Image (spheres, rainbow, N blue to C red):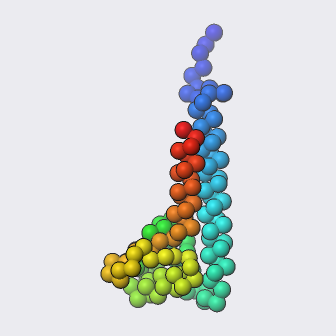
């Protein structure tokens, strides 16, 4: 009788961890999509072509932003980047990481919370 060469034979602990990780990934995706939908609702009254709308998508993949990061990724001026970030703070999408004006960092709290929950679920399943 030949031994299975499959690294994760059916019923193994590895198979259960893979299913758990996949489920956890789906939950993370769902949480991020819900955050993006909430943000879109908070953007009423902002022109559709405003850079602030494009910052929303950037914040999903990079939840800690600086004006320089926004300007580089969106290929806009620093002034436009700052205006976009302030708009998103006013709409409660982003929060300043600290009260200092110099070297300011803005955070997408919804994304960070989703990532924290993801990590917590993963650590519980170990």
Give how far across and how far down residue 118 sits, in percent.
Answer: 56, 53
Q: Which residue lies most toward the top here?
A: 1
Q: Residue furthest left?
A: 102
Q: Residue at x 39, y 79 (%)?
A: 99
Give the vertical position of 72 relative to 120 (above or below).
below
* In the displayed structure image, the side of residue 6 where residue 96 appears, left or right: left
Residue 45 is at least partly visible in this image: yes
Nearer to us in this view, 96 or 80: 96
- Is 111 situated above or below 44? above
| Residue at position x 62%, y 58% in the image | 29
Locate residue 33, reporting x and y percent.
Answer: 64, 65
x and y, in percent, of residue 85 in the image:
48, 82
Residue sitting at 64 percent across and 81 percent down?
Answer: 42
Q: Quadrant of the C terminus?
A: top right
Which of 118/71 is in front?
Answer: 118
30 in relation to 21, above or below = below
Q: Quadrant of residue 75?
A: bottom left
Quarter of the image with the N terminus is: top right
Q: Give percent across and percent down for residue 72.
A: 40, 76
How many labels sit on residues?
0
* Left or right side of 118 for 75: left
The answer to whether residue 72 is visible is: no
Between 113 and 64, the residue placed more toward the observer is: 113
Q: Residue at x 62, y 33 (%)?
A: 15
């Amino acid at each position: 009788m030949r031994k299975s060469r499959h690294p994760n034979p059916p019923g193994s602990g590895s198979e259960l961890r893979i299913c758990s990780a996949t489920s956890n990934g789906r939950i993370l995706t769902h949480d991020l999509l819900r955050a993006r939908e909430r943000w879109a609702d908070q953007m009423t009254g902002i022109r559709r072509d405003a850079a602030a709308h494009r910052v929303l998508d950037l914040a999903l993949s990079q939840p800690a932003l600086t004006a320089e990061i926004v300007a580089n990724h969106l290929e806009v001026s620093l002034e436009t980047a700052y205006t976009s970030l302030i708009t998103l703070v006013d709409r409660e999408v982003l929060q300043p990481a600290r009260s200092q004006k110099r070297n300011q960092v803005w955070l997408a709290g919804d994304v960070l919370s989703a990532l924290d929950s993801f990590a917590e679920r993963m650590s519980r399943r170990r």
